Image: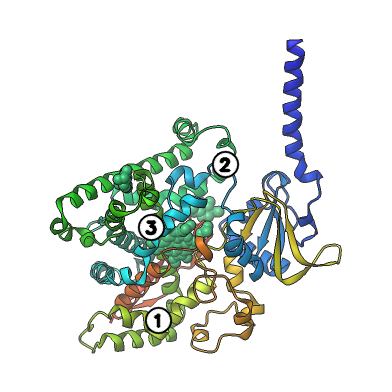
Amino acid sequence: MAISSLVALIGAIALVALWKLLREYIVRSPLDNLPGPQSGTLLLVGNLPELTTRDAWKRINYIAETYGPASVLRSVLGTRMLHVYDPKALHSILIKDVEQFPKDLSPSNDLPLLLGPGLLTTEGSQHRRQRKMLNPVFSAAHLRHMTHIFYDIAHKLRGAIEVRVDKQPEEVDVNGWMARTTLEMLGQAGLGYSFDNFVDDSSDSYGESIKLFFPMLSRIPLFGVIIPWISHYLPEAAIRMLLRKFPSANVRTMIAISDTMERRSQEIVDEKKTALLQGDDDLVQRVGEGKDIMSVLLRDNTTASDAEKLTNEELVAQMSVFILAGMDTTSNALSRILHLLAQHPAEQEKLRAEIREARGSSASDVGADISYDDLVKLPYLDAVCRETLRLYAPVMLIVRRAAKDIVLPLTWPVRGKDGSMMHELFVPKGTGILPNLQASNCNRALWGEDAMEWRPERWTEQLPEELDEARIPGVYSNLMTFSGGSRSCIGFKFSQLEMKVVLSVLLSKFKFELTDKPIAWNASAVTYPTMGEESTKPEMILKLTRI
Ligand code: HEM
Ligand SMILES: *[C@@H]1O[C@H](CO)[C@@H](O)[C@H](O)[C@H]1NC(C)=O
Ligand SMILES: *[C@@H]1O[C@H](CO)[C@@H](O)[C@H](O)[C@H]1NC(C)=O
């Protein structure tokens, strides 16, 4: 009797598992009427392989153009994903119904597991509380105080590149320098901590871990599929313990990177706490002058109401999140701008002229650093930054999941496979959603026929009426690059100030040109440059000349 009920139980579990496995293939979904590519040669993993290769950006652009603003893709075990860049649908996902579209429905996932409960990885009321506490430190008022820290680092960078250029002008790895620069800017302004003196080759264990984080994660693509599943059965601490013993070296390295980041963040937090106790005089002497984000948060925490206080774990996670979310994105955006300026010498010259005039520089003198207020207003510099961030969004896609059955409104009706017109979309609970930020930025229906061209001038002209009317839900000038709503990029002004400071210092001193080695861009969580299509090493060599 006991044995037969055990068999029945096992049988039932096996049936449920098999049903779950096959359900996606057997049961029809309202999404099936949407256009979309064939499921790929591998039924089990659907379109996933083509979306994770190094030239996935070509495939993603192709899918966006061919199948339009709302289409269906297949993921692991045939699960459907809604790929979307229709403005009204985006507005619902990111703003109006944001609570119904969390990043995931599982208790944990790869980033929450590896980074801890920071702004990028928390949901619901915990996220709202953190965001409320953090918004003021990313305000324009606070950024103004960081300008001289950014200039100071940009000048160290200039000095270091000068030494380099004098030796080998054709061989400057601009991407490597941009990564060092944005890490140091985040270190000083975010943590009050210096990673790099721009004299020696940097080898800070924290900095090295951070640089390896995304490349390592992209080597274990199934991590993000398996962790959410296990997290239903085991707490994060237990999963981490198991992974430390896991038979794959890449997985163990990934956990080791995450451990180093946590340990070093904690050490820096502890140092700050001691410094705070010793009073303001001591703080002013330190890196960041006590105005860095972490010092501000620690000080705010002492006066915040109990309901708003950050735990130690949350603060430590915040630090890793800022640096990870802010470093690669900004440094690759800077590399992309410099690559484009090297390809467009006339535009480079025009931008240099604007900067030199604002610096008051003469032939023999570089002039003075441009003040915060003047720098953010330089029209051509702003146009070059916007246009590059439009055409090459460093984060092409983001990921969401429907928390319940929900109807998405559409700006443009979609013709279904059965020929009928769909004026709204029924999205079943649990559906994975891929808001395509890049495709919205390059949509011909909004930006005009030249949407795929890099043309900074478009920002100094009247923008198309269609664009105004579409009401793009992005936080920044009709662009989706920094996403929108309560989960938009908190660092978008920070990042633009970094870029403008670096460009204003470097362009007044150096001319940037292509070498005869080709530059290729590798799609990843954040798109990055390599020398040639074969290489996997993040690197971008340009020829620099002093002027
Ligand atoms: C060009 C540079 C940058 C780009 C393109 C960019 C893009 C984005 C995007 C698309 C998101 C939304 C992610 C999602 O919803 O899944 C995001 C979120 C975020 N970004 Fe950025 N980012 C940049 C720079 C920065 C910088 C410099 C910082 C920090 C100083 C930063 C901190 C964050 C944080 C903390 C979040 C999570 C916000 C939340 O969920 O409340 N980012 N970023
Ligand atoms: C660049 O793309 C290739 C091919 O998809 C991939 O194997 C490689 O890991 C990527 N490089 C890095 C550093 O992630
Ligand atoms: C903030 O204050 C609370 C209560 O005083 C404390 O428990 C918590 O550890 C503090 N947070 C940080 C990051 O120090």
Quadrant including the N terminus: top right
Kind of residue at disc 3: Met
- Report if residue 531 is visible in the image: no
| Element assignment for label 1 | helix
User: Residue 483, image x and y in percent?
Assistant: 53, 65
Res. 323 image quadrant? bottom left
- Determine crowd level at label 3: few under 14, some 14-19, many 20+ residues with C-alpha closer than 10 A: some
Q: Which residue is mark 2?
A: 228
User: Which tag, 2 or 3, sits closer to the chain's start?
Assistant: 3
Q: Which mark is residue 133?
A: 3
C-alpha distance separating marks 2 and 3: 28 Å
Given this view, does label 1 or label 2 mark the residue nearer the observer? 2
Say which of 487 and 547 sits in front: 487
Kind of residue at disc 1: Leu
Q: Which mark is residue 455?
A: none
* Residue at x 57% of width, y 64% of height: 95
Compared across the picture, whether 234 is left or right of 256 comes to: right
Q: How is the image coloured?
A: rainbow
C-alpha distance separating marks 1 and 3: 32 Å
Compared across the picture, whether 191 is left or right of 452 comes to: left
- Report if residue 322 is visible in the image: yes
| Element assignment for label 3 | helix
Q: Is mark 1 within 8 Å of ligand 1?
A: no
